[in-house]
Image (spheres, helix red, strand yellow):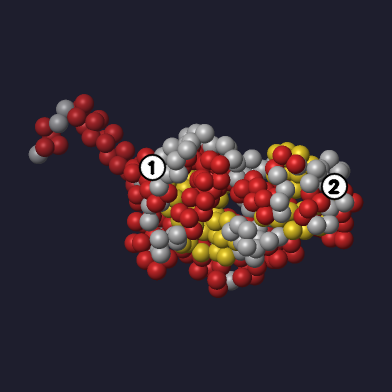
Amino acid sequence: MWGFMMNNKQRIAIGILIGLIIIVGVLILFTNIDNPTGAAIYGVKNIDLAINPVPNSALIFIAEEKGYFTEQELKINYHNFPTGKLALDALIGGGADIATTADVPIALAGLAGQDILVLATIEYSNNNIQVVARKDSGIITPADLKGKKIATTNGGGPLFFTHKFLERNEIDISDVKLVYLNPSDMVAALNKKDIDAFIVFEPSPAVAKREIGNDKVTIFAPTDLYGETWNIVVMNNFDNQNEGIIKKFIVALLKAEMFLKENKEESLDIVSKYSGIDKNLLADIMQKQTYGVVLNNLIVEYPKQEAEWAIKTRISSQNEVPNYYKLVNSQYLRELKPSAVTI
């Protein structure tokens, strides 16, 4: 009855509507065919991650390779940086949603009043940073570094380590020629004798021993001087607006942690692929590192010590150590894995 009462315009409008419904149905069908998880393509969240692709970031590499981020409907866009300090700078500058970084950049950001939050620590090592020196520069003992040209990075763990190492060996920082280089440039500079030594994290020390010759370099690697944490950091406003996204990101890392524990050899292959480090070198490096998604007191104690150092050395113009507990958000990990939180 209603069909006879419709005019031509109404019939055309209804025809168009039915056609649109059919098109949408076909699109949904083909979306599900291409996406066997059944997740609608429009539900995927793009995340910009500022990362230093070193072995410290192993859990992220595994989560990517094994599809754990995809399972959580996350698409990670990777932005690589030579240091964690630069990755954190990118986050603070608005160029990323999440960053990987060590504790010294966190300490300095806290001193500068940056509104950052640490969500988890994903790696720890107490001998990742090493001093690599040329023997033919006359460097056999730590005292021989006096008067020498030493390269390190600016504003990160290696700089803190440099100060502490020289102080332990009664060498004033003014008695060495300190220069700042990217880690990837240090081995070449040492090989060409542009510098006498460098102080930085792996893999540069391992690469230097292989390329220059283990018998031609002196290595200082004290394990009681500095233990570096590797952390997941966001800005406070991102945390406030994306709780579901952050939870999914941490879930993927927890799955990667379990995979690493159960599949050492395949994990080694994955980290080699993403970091570009030869497996033979990487195996030794990863044996010295502890991987796991945790939050413990180190992420508060270390930045406090580093802030005191930065104030004393006037690296920071501030004169008060922040409360670093306020820069940690443990709510996600407490919910997902309570035993991992001891802070």
12 or 215, which lies in front? 215
Give x and y (percent) for residue 296.
45, 61
Q: Residue at x 48, y 55 (%)?
A: 301
From the image, tell me which residue sits under label 2: 191
Q: Give the mark nearest the N terminus, 2 or 1.
A: 2
213 or 146, which lies in front? 146
Q: What kind of element bears circle 1?
A: helix
Q: Locate the C terminus by quadrant.
A: bottom left
State whether residue 99 appears in this view: no
316 or 62, which lies in front? 316
186 or 333, which lies in front? 186
CA distance for labels 2 and 1:
43 Å
Instruction: Name which quarter of the figure residue 313 lies in.
Output: top right
Callout 1 crowding tier (Cα within 10 Å): few <14, some 14–19, many ≥20: some
Judge left or right: residue 193 versus residue 17. right
Q: Residue at x 55, y 56 (%)?
A: 229
- Residue flagged by tag 1: what amino acid is it? Asn
Give x and y (percent) for residue 269.
66, 63
- Residue flagged by tag 2: what amino acid is it? Asn
Judge left or right: residue 264 versus residue 147. left
Callout 2 crowding tier (Cα within 10 Å): few <14, some 14–19, many ≥20: some
From the image, tell me which residue sits under label 1: 236
Q: Residue at x 49, y 58 (%)?
A: 298
State whether residue 137 appears in this view: yes
Q: Report how many numbered discs are placed on residues in the image.
A: 2
Give x and y (percent) for residue 86.
58, 40
Give x and y (percent) for residue 141.
80, 57
Q: Residue at x 62, y 62 (%)?
A: 224
Instruction: Name which quarter of the figure residue 72 lies in.
Output: bottom left
Which mark, residue 64?
A: none
Q: What kind of element bears circle 2?
A: helix
